[in-house]
Image: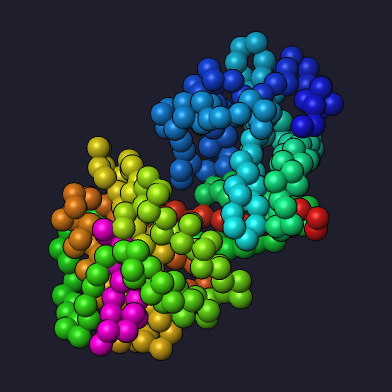
């Protein structure tokens, strides 16, 4: 780790790692940044408490804080080992009162140095990639990322739907639907490949895709609600479901349609609309009040379909990335 002793001194503030008692202070800091950065997806108190109690958070974070508990700068990272690569997710902010003084660069330097060191330790020949994700940030953040060589990976629009509202009248008699099983999991991946080859040049390998999207050992993956659509026995579309707690309504249950796709040879037949309608019916029967999904801003056809099915835009989500040695 790069020592916090080497960070620039800020009068009245001390550098240290995040501690288990910092949750309320971090929540107050985020709220202080919101008028400048936006307030689309602020963490609640429980989410901040969960963060400060994460394993090794003290050694993979840095914070500039004064004796009154006021925070000037905070950042942390998380390394995610995947089959085909090692990713490091970087998170951090500078209080608006301290912006324009190059502290954003200091923060990114520290995050990259420490996350990069940890990625190299476990890489074993795999590519190492930094990722920065956010719902809202002031324009100066994106300017810094671009200056440091980060490329925009995507901007996705998050859409929600109240599952208690009436369904659209969609009927597709030639389709059958079945939940995910160990036997049909290769068919899910087959449709993923056929659906996303028109959207991406970097398709995930089978083991990696299953681990990330359809892992039965994951606590939030819902195999019984993840559906495969068949036409005359051929797999033609799929939807993957994960559970997520939500504040969309008090005490409401939200299901995340993590990924959905229609085989490129079966598009413009109403299959996507039929699959999603069937999926929402299953979710409602399982006790979910809300469903959410994300659509790339470069995919207006899909967005139009989701709007037709009753989904509405609630937020935009941005991802930047850079290879470790770029």
Q: On the rendered structure, is 13 left or right of 248?
A: right
Instruction: Please say whether residue 157 is visible from this viewpoint.
Output: no
Q: Nearer the viewer, residue 296 or 174?
A: 174
Give residue 305's position: percent from left, percent from top: 34, 74
- Give the side of residue 321 with respect to residue 285, left or right: right
Residue 229 highlighted magenta (yes or no): yes
Relative to residue 107, is residue 307 depicted above or below? below
Res 118 quadrant in image: top right
Q: Position of residue 237 (x, y in %)?
A: 35, 76
* Figure colour scheme: rainbow
Q: Is residue 76 left or right of residue 250?
A: right
Q: Residue at x 56, y 68 (%)?
A: 205
Q: Camera-side residue: 306 or 84?
A: 84
Main SS of residues in magenta: strand
On the picture, is 90 further left or further right than 304? right
**Residue 28 placed where, x, y %?**
52, 25
Q: Is residue 108 magenta?
A: no
Q: Residue at x 66, y 30 (%)?
A: 61
Q: Vertical placement of 188 versus 226: above or below?
A: below
Q: Which residue is depicted at the point 71% across and 51% down?
A: 123
Give 111 or 138, whichever is nearer the viewer: 111
Tell which residue pokes out farthest to the front in this image. 183
> How many numbered dots are placed on residues in this image?
0
In front here: 21 or 212?
212
Residue 282 shows in this picture = yes
Indicate the quadrant containing the N terminus: top left, top right, bottom left or bottom right: top right
Identify the residue at image location x=49%, y=76%.
193
Quadrant in which the C terminus is drawn: bottom right
x and y percentages locating residue 319 in the rendered image? 59, 56
Q: Which residues are magenta?
A: 224-238
């Amino acid at each position: 780790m790069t020592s916090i002793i080497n960070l620039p001194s800020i009068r009245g503030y001390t550098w240290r790692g995040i501690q288990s008692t910092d949750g309320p202070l971090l929540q107050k800091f985020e709220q202080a940044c919101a008028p400048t950065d936006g307030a689309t997806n602020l963490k609640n108190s429980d989410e901040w408490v969960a963060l400060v109690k994460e394993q090794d958070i003290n050694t993979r974070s840095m914070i500039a804080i004064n004796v009154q508990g006021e925070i000037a700068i905070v950042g942390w990272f998380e390394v995610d080992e995947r089959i085909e690569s090692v990713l490091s997710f970087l998170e951090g902010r500078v209080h608006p009162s301290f912006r324009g003084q190059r502290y954003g660069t200091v923060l990114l330097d520290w995050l990259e140095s420490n996350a990069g060191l940890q990625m190299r330790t476990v890489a074993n020949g795999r590519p190492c990639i930094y990722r920065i994700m956010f719902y809202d940030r002031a324009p100066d953040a994106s300017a810094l990322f671009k200056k440091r060589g980060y490329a925009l990976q995507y901007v996705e629009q998050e859409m929600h739907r109240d599952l208690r509202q009436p369904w659209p009248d969609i009927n597709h008699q030639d389709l059958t639907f079945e939940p995910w099983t160990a036997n049909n999991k290769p068919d899910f991946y087959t449709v993923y490949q056929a659906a996303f080859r028109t959207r991406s040049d970097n398709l995930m390998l089978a083991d990696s895709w299953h681990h990330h999207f359809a892992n039965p050992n994951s606590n939030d993956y819902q195999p019984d609600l993840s559906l495969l659509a068949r036409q005359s026995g051929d797999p033609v579309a799929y939807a993957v479901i994960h559970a997520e707690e939500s504040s969309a309504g008090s005490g409401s249950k939200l299901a995340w349609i993590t990924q959905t796709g229609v085989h490129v040879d079966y598009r413009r037949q109403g299959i996507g609309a039929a699959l999603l309608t069937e999926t929402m019916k299953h979710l409602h029967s399982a006790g979910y009040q809300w469903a959410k999904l994300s659509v790339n801003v470069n995919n207006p056809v899909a967005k139009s379909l989701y709007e037709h099915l009753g989904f509405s835009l609630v937020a935009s989500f941005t991802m930047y990335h850079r290879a470790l040695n770029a």
